[in-house]
């Protein structure tokens, strides 16, 4: 029934009178949700952020995204998170437009506002306090080059990736929602790409989405294929410019493990369909990357799209040129998507591999053996950005029902460990080899060897049935405490600030 109502709202949101009715319903849902969540013990404030905080939001397309700020007392995660989970489940049954929830302390929110990248400085002026005392927003701490070049590049990359997620997966939600999302995401890719490509003539910030729509009315007429292809070419051009602006004089090994015979058979078949591609990299459970040569033509991207539509691949596919590949491997996306730069081509242990079977990177073809590095300061800032985001969404991921236990443990542990190493200026990968990163990161957090040994045993002792469940209650109770300690280590590193 919810799906039918959603389609009806999407189809009629532009009808005079109905649009105003829908906005009234959203306003009621927003007020009641904020009140119900703020009533939970330990919550100090509730903020509205992202789409609905601006006047150009659309019913059926935009969600109600909230930030919940914890009080000063250290929360008992084992008690407070199940309460929040139950309250959110009840609210979402009544208000399906309730979207992402972020949850963190005032300190964690301040870290985000200092280091959180483009969304921290583009969105925060529009945040609306709904409940509780207001917070003092600290000034942005990141460097000028990161704000000018790397921040818009990251969201150009993310917008393009989300366009691809919907283009290559026809089952990704109702067709009307998928189409509306793709056009909204394309406007973001357009405004971030144009901001980068304007170079010295750019203003202090990218255009708003409404301004981008006014400048690009054709966005409403382009087909999904054209949206994806245009954003692909914009990403390629912007990546070359950003890397030229920000790259240091150094290079770093980017050697990826060769695919196993079983993996090689599948990936080689895909590579053989693409005479323009240099390599295929699979990084389960996240992405499959098709790596093209420098200055690839539009026809090369079109052929890659045809091959991906004909033979779907694991994860979200991304077709990238060398400059975009180099920036993606050093970006804040996914807490650094592969974590392989400078890490060598080894694999995790047999025991660790059984826990997350087949997950991690492997390649066929000839991916670049070395990649140009960003400066040390920029690498620290991207790690700080990823860590500041992680502090606000790890708890909602833990209580969410959309991801299985195996993915949640893999993502939270590998990213927390890798980011702690990156914030110390050390190689953070390979991320999939969590047994290698665990003792190194634990030592940086001031933990003794017993913590690393207990966490390793905690993971290896999880039965497969529990890992395949979506219920965190099926997992051993020690995981929540271990993750809390790891996140505290990230907070301490962010409070310390960048190296001199």
Image (cartoon, rainbow, N blue to C red):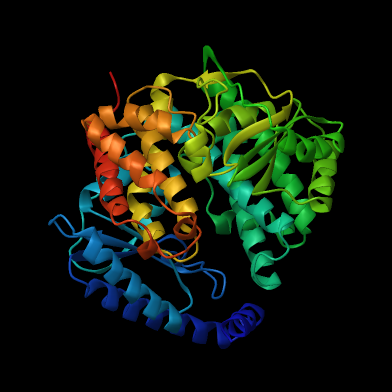
Q: Residue at x 24, y 61 (%)?
A: 78
The quadrant holding residue 370 is top right
Quadrant of the snapshot with the N terminus: bottom right
Q: Residue furthest left?
A: 73
The relative height of residue 468 versus residue 411 in the rendered view (above or below) is below
Of 207 and 484, the residue lying toward us = 484
Say whether residue 426 is left or right of residue 110: right
Residue 247 coordinates in the image, percent (x, y): 53, 19
Q: Residue furthest top?
A: 249
Of 289 and 69, the residue lying toward us = 289
Of 495 and 422, the residue lying toward us = 422
Quadrant of the snapshot with the C terminus: top left
The image shows a total of numbered marks equal to 0
Residue 263 coordinates in the image, percent (x, y): 72, 38
Residue 392 coordinates in the image, percent (x, y): 34, 52
The quadrant holding residue 143 is top left
Say whether residue 18 is left or right of residue 483: right
- Please indicate, yes or no, whether residue 217 appears anywhere in the rendered image: yes
The relative height of residue 408 versus residue 141 in the rendered view (above or below) is below
- Please indicate, yes or no, whether residue 205 appears anywhere in the rendered image: no
Say whether residue 116 is left or right of residue 210: left
The relative height of residue 74 versus residue 415 in the rendered view (above or below) is below
Of 68 and 466, the residue lying toward us = 466
Residue 164 coordinates in the image, percent (x, y): 68, 51
């Amino acid at each position: 029934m919810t799906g039918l109502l959603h389609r009806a709202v999407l189809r009629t949101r532009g009808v005079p009178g109905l649009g105003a009715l829908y906005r009234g319903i959203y306003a009621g849902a927003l007020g009641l949700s904020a009140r119900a969540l703020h009533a939970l013990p330990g919550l100090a404030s509730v903020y509205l952020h992202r789409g609905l905080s601006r006047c150009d939001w659309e019913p059926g397309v935009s969600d109600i995204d909230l930030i919940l700020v914890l009080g000063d007392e250290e929360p008992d995660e084992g008690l407070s998170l199940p309460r929040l989970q139950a309250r959110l489940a009840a609210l979402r049954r009544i208000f399906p437009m309730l979207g992402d929830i972020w949850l963190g302390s005032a300190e964690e929110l301040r870290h985000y506002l200092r280091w959180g990248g483009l969304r921290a400085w583009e969105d925060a002026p529009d945040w609306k306090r709904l409940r509780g005392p207001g917070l003092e927003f600290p000034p942005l701490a990141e460097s000028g080059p990161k704000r000018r070049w790397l921040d818009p590049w990251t969201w150009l990359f993310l917008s393009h990736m989300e366009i691809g997620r919907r283009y290559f997966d026809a089952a990704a939600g109702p067709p009307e929602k998928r189409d509306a999302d793709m056009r909204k995401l394309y406007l973001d890719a357009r405004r971030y790409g144009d901001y980068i490509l304007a170079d010295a003539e750019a203003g202090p910030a990218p255009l708003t989405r409404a301004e981008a729509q006014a400048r690009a009315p054709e966005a409403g007429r382009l087909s999904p294929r054209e949206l994806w292809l245009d954003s692909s070419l914009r990403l390629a051009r912007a990546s070359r410019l950003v890397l030229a602006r920000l790259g240091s004089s150094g290079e770093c090994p980017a050697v990826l493990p060769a695919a196993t015979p079983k993996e090689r058979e599948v990936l080689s078949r895909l590579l053989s369909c693409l005479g323009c591609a240099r390599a295929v990299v699979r990084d389960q459970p996240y992405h499959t990357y098709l790596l093209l040569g420098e200055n690839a033509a539009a026809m090369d991207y079109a052929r890659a799209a045809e091959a991906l539509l004909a033979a779907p691949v694991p994860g979200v596919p991304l077709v990238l040129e060398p400059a975009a590949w180099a920036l993606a491997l050093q970006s804040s996306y996914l807490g650094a998507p592969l974590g392989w730069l400078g890490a060598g081509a080894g694999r995790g242990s047999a025991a660790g591999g059984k826990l997350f079977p087949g997950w991690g990177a492997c390649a066929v073809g000839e991916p670049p053996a070395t990649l140009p590095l960003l400066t040390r300061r920029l690498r620290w800032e991207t790690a700080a950005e990823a860590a500041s985001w992680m502090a606000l969404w790890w708890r909602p991921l833990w209580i969410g029902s959309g991801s299985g236990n195996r993915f949640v443990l893999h993502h939270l542990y590998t990213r927390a460990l890798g980011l702690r190493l990156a914030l110390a200026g050390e190689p953070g990968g390979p991320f999939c080899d969590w047994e290698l990163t665990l003792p190194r990161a634990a030592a940086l957090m001031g933990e003794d060897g017993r913590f690393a040994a207990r966490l390793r045993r905690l993971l290896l002792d999880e039965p497969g049935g529990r890992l395949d469940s979506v219920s965190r209650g099926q997992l051993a109770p020690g995981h929540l405490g271990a993750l809390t300690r790891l996140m505290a280590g990230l907070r301490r590193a962010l409070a310390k600030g960048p190296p001199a």
